[in-house]
């Protein structure tokens, strides 16, 4: 039975996981199977530039230096503000997350598939699980995650662990997730994805 009736004819599924878990790759597999995927982080970056109301709220919160003269986001300036003040981070999230949610809800109505997916790095952390019929957690071992992140952006293991420690653990998220995918090396993904799809089809 559906938990959240976002759209009467659609099953709305969240895909989440920590950095290096490979949730984006799982989403790309789903897209190759013709399922639509909405990428929240990518959309958030776009909204910060294109949504005039969001831009106004960001400038009101951080000042005119929030955007550069070429109309792009002043990421270094905002990062320096946010990382030194958790209250500002909370306030920024309170601007961006609802805007992303609005864009997502509109996107859902435009899709023809009866199952749609939303990749989002933080779902449980901000209390957004209630917006989905089901949430899938993509998991991987710490060693696998570190190896993937190093390959992706050449970060040091120490910096990666620091970022990981700022996120909820897989164990904590597993208690809240409806489904989990083991995305470690040498583990087959497709059978796990198909099993979840079969279960979702029965919602």
Image (cartoon, rainbow, N blue to C red):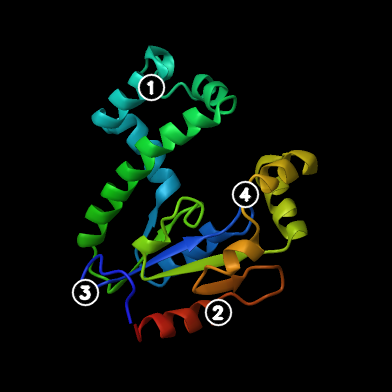
Q: In the picture shown, does residue 192 fall above or below 183?
A: below
> Mark 3 or 2 closer to N-term?
3
Q: Residue at x 35, y 83 (%)?
A: 201
Q: Say which element carries label 4.
A: loop
Kindly identify which residue carries mark 3. 9
Tell me the distance, in whole angstroms, between the alpha carbons under discs 3 and 1.
39 Å
Q: Nearer the viewer, mark 3 or mark 4?
A: 4
Q: Position of residue 83 (x, y in %)?
A: 58, 28
122 sits left or right of 95 in the view: right
Question: Is residue 98 or residue 24 the one in the foreground?
Answer: 98
Q: Nearer the viewer, mark 4 or mark 2?
A: 4
Q: Position of residue 183 (x, y in %)?
A: 63, 68
The residue carrying pointer 2 sits among few (fewer than 14), some (14 to 19) or many (20 or more) residues within 10 Å by Cα, namely some
Tell me the distance, in whole angstroms, between the alpha carbons under discs 4 and 2.
25 Å
Q: Residue at x 43, y 84 (%)?
A: 199
Tell me the distance, in whole angstroms, between the alpha carbons under discs 1 and 2.
44 Å
> Mark 3 or 4 closer to N-term?
3
> Mark 1 or 4 closer to N-term?
1
Q: Position of residue 37 (x, y in %)?
A: 38, 60
Q: In the picture shown, does residue 51 fall above or below 100?
A: above
Kindly identify which residue carries mark 1. 61
Kindly identify which residue carries mark 4. 167
Tell me the distance, in whole angstroms, between the alpha carbons under discs 3 and 2.
24 Å
Q: Residue at x 35, y 35 (%)?
A: 95
Tell me the distance, in whole angstroms, between the alpha carbons under discs 3 and 4.
34 Å
Q: Say which element carries label 1.
A: helix
Kindly identify which residue carries mark 2. 192
> Mark 1 or 2 closer to N-term?
1
């Amino acid at each position: 039975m559906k938990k959240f009736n976002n759209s009467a004819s659609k099953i709305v599924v969240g895909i989440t996981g920590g950095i290096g878990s490979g949730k984006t790759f799982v989403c790309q597999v789903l897209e190759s199977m013709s399922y639509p995927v909405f990428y929240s982080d990518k959309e958030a970056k776009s909204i910060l530039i294109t949504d005039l109301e969001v831009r106004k709220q960001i400038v009101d919160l951080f000042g005119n230096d929030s955007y550069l003269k070429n109309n792009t986001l002043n990421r270094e300036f905002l990062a320096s503000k946010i990382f030194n003040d958790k209250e500002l981070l909370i306030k920024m999230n309170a601007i961006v997350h609802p805007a992303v949610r609005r864009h997502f809800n509109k996107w859902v109505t435009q899709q023809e598939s009866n199952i749609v997916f939303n990749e989002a790095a933080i779902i449980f952390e901000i209390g957004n699980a209630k917006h989905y019929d089901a949430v899938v957690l993509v998991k991987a071992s710490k060693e696998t995650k570190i190896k993937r992140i190093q390959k992706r952006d050449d970060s040091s293991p120490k910096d990666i662990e620091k970022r990981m420690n700022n996120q909820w653990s897989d164990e904590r998220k597993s208690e809240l997730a409806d489904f989990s995918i083991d995305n470690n090396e040498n583990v087959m993904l497709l059978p796990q994805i198909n099993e979840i799809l079969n279960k979702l089809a029965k919602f």
